[in-house]
Each structure stands twice: as C-alpha cells, then as structure tokens.
Image (tube, rainbow, N blue to C red):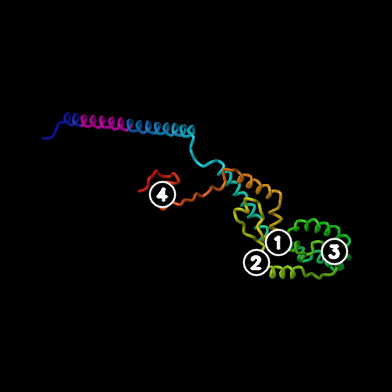
C-alpha cells in the first residue's frame, strides 16, 4: 500500500531535520578545530619569543673574541699578499695607440692626406693630437711596455714618416718573459711579521710596501703579539705508560693499574 501524502511529508521533514542537526554539528567541530589550531600557533609563537629573549639575556660560552679579531686581521693580510701577487702576474695592457705609433700615423695623414685637399695641415693638427696623446698616455704608467721601455710613451710629436716597431718589440718581450718567476710563496710567520717573502718582483714589492698594505700587516702583527696567542709549551714526561702520563699531567686521577 502506498503512503499517503501526509505520511510522505512527515518522513521528509524528519530527514531534513536530521540533516540540519548534522550540519550544525560539523560546523561546531570545525570551529572548535580552528580555534584549537589558532591557540596552538599563539602558544608556539610565545614560546619562541620567550626562548629568544632568554637566549639573548644569557651569556653564551665560546671562543675568546680575540680569536675572531685575529682571524679577521689575518684574512685582510692575506688579501694584501694576493693583491701583490696579482700585480706581479697580471700586466696592464699597453695602449694600442702607442704600440701603433699614432703620432707618426697622424703626422703622415696630416702631411700626405692634406695634399689631396687644401695642403698640409700638420701645424693645425699638432696641438690637438699631441696634447691628447700626452694626457692619454699618462694612464699607462704601469703597463708592461712602459715599465720595460719597450713602448715609447713619450712619442707624442707628429712626424711625417712612419717607422714603427713597438708591436713587434712587445711580442718579443712577451715571448722572452714566459712564465712569471717573481711570485714568491709566503708562510704564516712571514705574514704575521709583515716580512716580505724572498724572490718578489718589482711590482710585487711595490704593492707589498705600499702604505695601505703596511698598515694592514702592522694590525695583524699587533693582534698576534697579544700574550693570549703565545705558543703553549708542550709538556714532556718520562712515564712508562700512557696512563701514567695522563696522571702526571693531571688529566685523570691515579694510581694506574
């Protein structure tokens, strides 16, 4: 027998009521769970803040600050050595204008090229080129060609002939020089004392003896002169066993078996 319309309505109403109560229960559980997570997060944050505050307020045992200072000064002194080595190994490139004798090229162009038009204009061009070359060549005082006088950086006067061997001479210099042999190794005691290692080339020594380098090396020497860094005396013993040696040094109590 089929249910009446009223019975069907009552049954559906009961189901809807049960579903509503279930949803309310789920929402309550979600709210309770979210609140629990929020409280846990707040508690964890408070623990972190309090722990950090306690750690800052409490002294931490560690290395003597003098050790850190000595390490910093030693690193700076090592940079002084590295820079001096770089100065010795790396040659500053020479000016292309100087190696191709630009004063001669410009002079020939002014004399011979000017004849194509209104005539030689060397006199008019000379002040412009010569002053510019003089100022430009001042930046190449440390170049290999300047140090060895292989490239003539004083040649700034215009000439109406071209005879240039600077490029060939520079190539010969590089071939003859080969691998740098004026780069010395340094030990820790030389670094501390600021003593230049033997065998340094001119560029190495010029940089090593510069005021800024000397100041850094002196700072390391001063730090390492502190009695804190005095080399400890290594104890000796005539003990017949390792156990007895430890007892003699006060590391373990005796007697030995």
Is residue 38 found left or right of 4 in the rendered image?
Answer: right
Cα–Cα gap, marks 3 and 1: 24 Å
Image coordinates of residue 160 in percent, x first then y, are: 86, 68
Callout 2: SS: loop
| Cβ–Cβ under 8 Å for marks 3 and 1 | no
In the rendered image, which residue does mark 2 sit on?
Answer: 179
Image coordinates of residue 223 in percent, x first then y, are: 61, 44
Q: Identify the residue at image location x=59%, y=53%.
A: 188
Please say whether residue 27 is one of the residues in the magenta stretch: yes
Disc on the earlier residue, 1 or 2:
1
In the rendered image, which residue does mark 4 sit on?
Answer: 244
| Cβ–Cβ under 8 Å for marks 1 and 4 | no
Please state which of the two labelled residues, at mark 4 or mark 2, is closer to the viewer.
4
Image coordinates of residue 129 in percent, x first then y, are: 82, 59
Callout 4: SS: helix
Which quarter of the image is occupied by the N terminus? top left
In the rendered image, which residue does mark 3 sit on?
Answer: 158
Q: Relative to 252, is 240 above or below? A: below
Q: Callout 1: 10 Å neighbours few (<14), some, many (20+)?
A: few
């Amino acid at each position: 027998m089929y249910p009446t319309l009223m019975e069907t309505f009552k049954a559906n109403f009961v189901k809807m009521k049960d579903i509503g109560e279930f949803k309310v229960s789920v929402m309550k559980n979600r709210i309770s769970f979210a609140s629990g997570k929020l409280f846990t997060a707040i508690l964890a944050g408070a623990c972190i803040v309090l722990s950090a505050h306690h750690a800052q307020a409490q002294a931490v045992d560690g290395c003597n600050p003098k050790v850190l200072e000595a390490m910093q000064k030693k690193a700076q002194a090592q940079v002084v050595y590295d820079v001096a080595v770089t100065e010795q190994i790396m040659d500053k490139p020479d000016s292309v204008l100087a190696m191709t004798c630009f004063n001669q090229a410009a002079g020939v162009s002014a004399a011979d090229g000017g004849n194509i038009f209104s005539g030689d204009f060397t006199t008019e061009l000379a002040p412009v080129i010569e002053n510019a070359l003089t100022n430009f060549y001042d930046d190449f005082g440390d170049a290999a060609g300047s140090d060895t006088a292989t490239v003539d950086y004083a040649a700034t006067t215009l000439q109406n002939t071209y005879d240039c061997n600077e490029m060939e001479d520079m190539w010969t210099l590089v071939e003859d020089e080969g691998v740098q042999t004026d780069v010395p190794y340094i030990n820790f005691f030389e670094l501390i004392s600021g003593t230049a290692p033997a065998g340094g080339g001119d560029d190495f020594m010029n940089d090593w003896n510069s005021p800024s380098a000397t100041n850094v090396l002196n700072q390391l020497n001063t730090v390492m002169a502190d009695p804190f860094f005095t080399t400890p005396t290594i104890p000796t013993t005539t003990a017949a066993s390792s156990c007895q040696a430890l007892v003699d040094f006060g590391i373990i109590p005796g007697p030995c078996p």
